[in-house]
Amino acid sequence: MAAAAAELALVKSFHPMSKFSGRASSKVATFRPRHLRISASAAAAPPAAGPKKKKSGKTTEINETLLTPRFYTTDFEEMEQLFNAEMNKNLNQAEFEALLNEFKTDYNQTHFVRNPEFKEAADKMQGPLRKIFVEFLERSCTAEFSGFLLYKELGRRLKKTNPVVAEIFSLMSRDEARHAGFLNKGLSDFNLALDLGFLTKARKYTFFKPKFIFYATYLSEKIGYWRYITIYRHLKANPEFQLYPIFKYFENWCQDENRHGDFFSALMKAQPQFLNDWKAKLWSRFFCLSVYVTMYLNDCQRTTFYEGIGLNTKEFDMHVIIETNRTTARIFPAVLDVENPEFKRKLDRMVEINKKLIAVGESQDLPVVKNLKKVPLVAALVSEIVAAYLMPPVESGSVDFADFEPTLVY
Ligand SMILES: [Fe+2]
Ligand SMILES: [Fe+2]
């Protein structure tokens, strides 16, 4: 999974047709921050670096909010049934075997090799930019690691039912482990390290039914691809903003994410019931909206980072959203009309409301006063999100399915 991966939870609890299992919905309907832990790997971390240190010195805590990358779990028994070749005649084993061979080729086996440039670049970075870089590395590492855990478990659980699909999941978890590890090495340049073992045990897992895992992971892989390739191309054209060498690795890296997304595309084609009815259309739009809104709100809180590498945050995000939406339209039966200027206007209004919500959260008011002040803001945010959801959609999807009314959109 990629940087924007796994950041799905934002609007789930607000959604009018939200009917996730109780295990999931009860976990996200709160603004209360939880915590995750990172360790300072050396005592000499520069003072401006990283999140606030606890007095004990050894461990550092950062806030985990509704917009933080999440960890997922699913109904593995249902997954087993879905990939049982005897029960599901739509499974195109030949296609999965071809994909498996591609994953076995392991194009990026020797790609993630570090050099002394990393530490030198990190040492040069100071002040707010350094802090936001550390946060970027932490969030990206958490998101990649989240993918690793989910794919590893799927690889393990599907071994008996469908060894080919299972092996692909295992090889995808190999990729994600590599990505997370590379980002965590990056944190060591800033004298920090994410405690991934601790994260595995301590973090809560959000439950999604298999169908929703497919929508969510497909989108996060594809949006990850578009984020990485856009940053890579921008920095190639504007090398003066190449502040840290990790971005030079994004071109091959994002091909991993693209392959992961293509695998989910093949998985969904093997489960046409998830793509070919009116419910699938509603859910497709819902997941697109959750992913796009989450990314936009997250990134607009981190303009220092994007400006630091010479990007205009909103332009970058809109480019990523539009490209991801075009890619997604090839497989999802409906997507949002993100190229309608009204969609961006709605996103911008959400950003303004979210800023006010953050200001209330950071104020010195009593908790009860804060909550009272948040009510109208949350209501305004929900109404913008619902309005964006209800905008006329774009019918899309593969023409392979007879039940679709195919429309050529792009
Ligand atoms: Fe990844
Ligand atoms: Fe991935």
Image: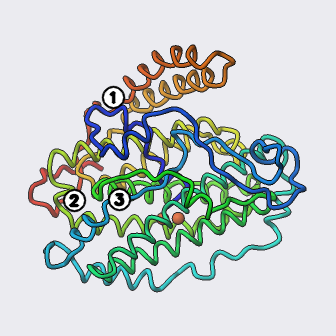
Label at residue 74: 3
Asked if ligand 2 lies within 8 A of label 1, the reply is: no
Residues marked 2 and 3 touching at CB (< 8 Å): no
Where does residue 223 sit, x and y in percent of width and height? Answer: 46, 54
Q: CA distance from mark 2 to mark 3?
A: 26 Å
**What residue type is disc 3 on?**
Thr
Q: Which residue is mark 1?
A: 386
Secondary structure beneath label 3:
loop
Relative placement, left or right, of 151 versus 400 is right
Secondary structure beneath label 2:
loop
* Residue closest to the far right: 44
Other residues around mark 1 within 10 Å, as few (<14) / some (14–19) / many (≥20): some
Where does residue 332 sit, x and y in percent of width and height? Answer: 27, 53
Label at residue 264: none
Where does residue 137 sit, x and y in percent of width and height? Answer: 67, 55
- Identify the coloring: rainbow
Q: Report which quarter residue 366 is drawn in.
A: top right
Q: Report which quarter residue 86 is drawn in.
A: bottom left
Q: Residue at x 64, y 39 (%)?
A: 302
Residues marked 1 and 3 touching at CB (< 8 Å): no
Q: CA distance from mark 1 to mark 3?
A: 26 Å
Q: Which residue is mark 2?
A: 398
